[in-house]
Amino acid sequence: MHLKLPLSLKGMTTLDRDQFKQTISVPYVNIPVECIQSSKWKNYLLCLPSLKNVRDLQPILKTHKQVLFDPDIIENKEDVIKKIPSITKYVEESFDFTPLAITYENYSIEQVIKAILPDDLGKDRPINTGSGYSLIGHIAHFNLKDAVLPYKHIIAQVVLDKLTHVKTVVNKLHEIDSVYRNFELEIIAGEPNTIVKCRESKAIFQFDFAKVYWNPRLSTERERIVNVLHHNDLVFDVFAGVGPFVVPASMLGCTVYANDINPESVKWMTINLKTNRTKKSSNEYHVFNLDGREFLRTIVFPRIESYQKEIANDNEKRWCLSDNKIIILMNLPDIALTFLDVLPEWLSENIEEKQQWILPIHIHCYTFSKADNPDEDIRLRLKTILPNINDNQISCRFVRQVAPKKDMINNCANVSSAVHQLTSFKFSCERCIVFCHDLSILPKRLASVGNCFAISPPTKTS
């Protein structure tokens, strides 16, 4: 329902809740309890915050309830009969209008803020007028423009009033410009507490929002990446933050190597890895506080080499892990692509040894693009850094629009120079018998090969 508010509210900088009081006339019908179908009638009912649209008829009648309809939709009893013919009898008997007292509690955050802010705000260009915010645990996070700042305290108070779980309201003062990716913020209302807990991907994350980077609007993208991970995958996160990728990866049983240049992020990431343990959780996680290039050169590349060699030289591990993969995550969209400049030299070393590698290597590198054709733009930029990469080794996927004409893109590059022997192996025999002590370690692909059987080897008899 559209509630008209007095013009005297415009420009209010100190919240006066009494000015939101008004009385409206609302249509109603008294209906037997057993005939009420609120879910089917929801498009016609009066829907306002903190208001019941199905009310008791006390103290006289308990067999019926009073159902309130939206006066913008229902103007007379003919409207009710036309839209809900099943209650025609009760409409004829009891349809009427009742005065209804509306208070500050019955308005949404958006309605209150719109009523308060001057109409000319955002006239020249769209701005966040206060209805757009992110929720991080008990914190509501705003990014208010200069034109809205005179109203920041009243906006914050409205949020505290309407969202009972919010205890602190903050506003970002500047764009992210520090090497640690955190930003300066101002507490504009509520408790001076920026240490939060929030849930994502079945994990609970703790961190100090004032000292680390966390973007709840990327939760869908993080979930998408987590969903492609499997038990025993090897995961490297170059810019791991407080662990939104590596914590759920570890919970799935992946071996994770996580890095961030911000010591505060490393501190909270370690806590989050320790506190989110499951039965599947990998016992092997490693946390580093290094520059991204140093992490790639000194940790990622050597570990990939030793891991691939370890698998190639162990037949049982080849079977056990041949369905797995190595994933390198690089979520620092402003500059992540530039860190790929360390790849060509590494890939060109010991080529013969790398040709024996088993596991594919996928790099998920996030970046921004302002081009009309982001896919083409990113492919060209990638090829200037990795001149030998082919188009079929790159896939680009839109993540979200962060600003007008500025998209965030996930670029997945398959940089394996290996010949994946097991994935290309041809079963030329009529029947293949695999002797294996533990049948559960066999790769899934064997199940799709009709003439391949796995049996336990015979035990020795004395």
Image (spheres, grey):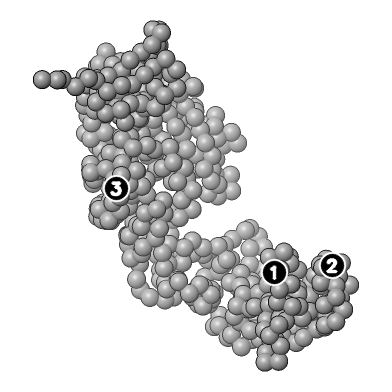
Quote the CA–CA distance across marks 3 and 2: 56 Å
Q: Residue at x 53, y 46 (%)?
A: 400
Q: Quadrant of the C terminus?
A: top left
In the displayed orientation, state which residue is furthest to the bottom.
59
In the displayed orientation, state which residue is furthest to the front.
462
Disc on res. 279: 3
Check disc 2: other Cα within 10 Å, few if <14, some if 14-19, many if 20+: few
| Horizontal and vertical percent position of residue 369 | 52, 39
Vertical arrangement, residue 436 with respect to residue 158, above or below: above
Disc 1 target residue = 38
Disc 2 target residue = 85
Q: Amino acid at mark 3?
A: Lys
**SS category of the residue bearing label 1:** helix
Q: Amino acid at mark 2?
A: Pro
- Whether residue 128 is visible, yes or no, is yes
| Horizontal and vertical percent position of residue 49 | 62, 75
> Mark 1 or 3 closer to N-term?
1
Q: Residue at x 30, y 15 (%)?
A: 355
Check disc 3: other Cα within 10 Å, few if <14, some if 14-19, many if 20+: few
Q: Residue at x 36, y 63 (%)?
A: 197
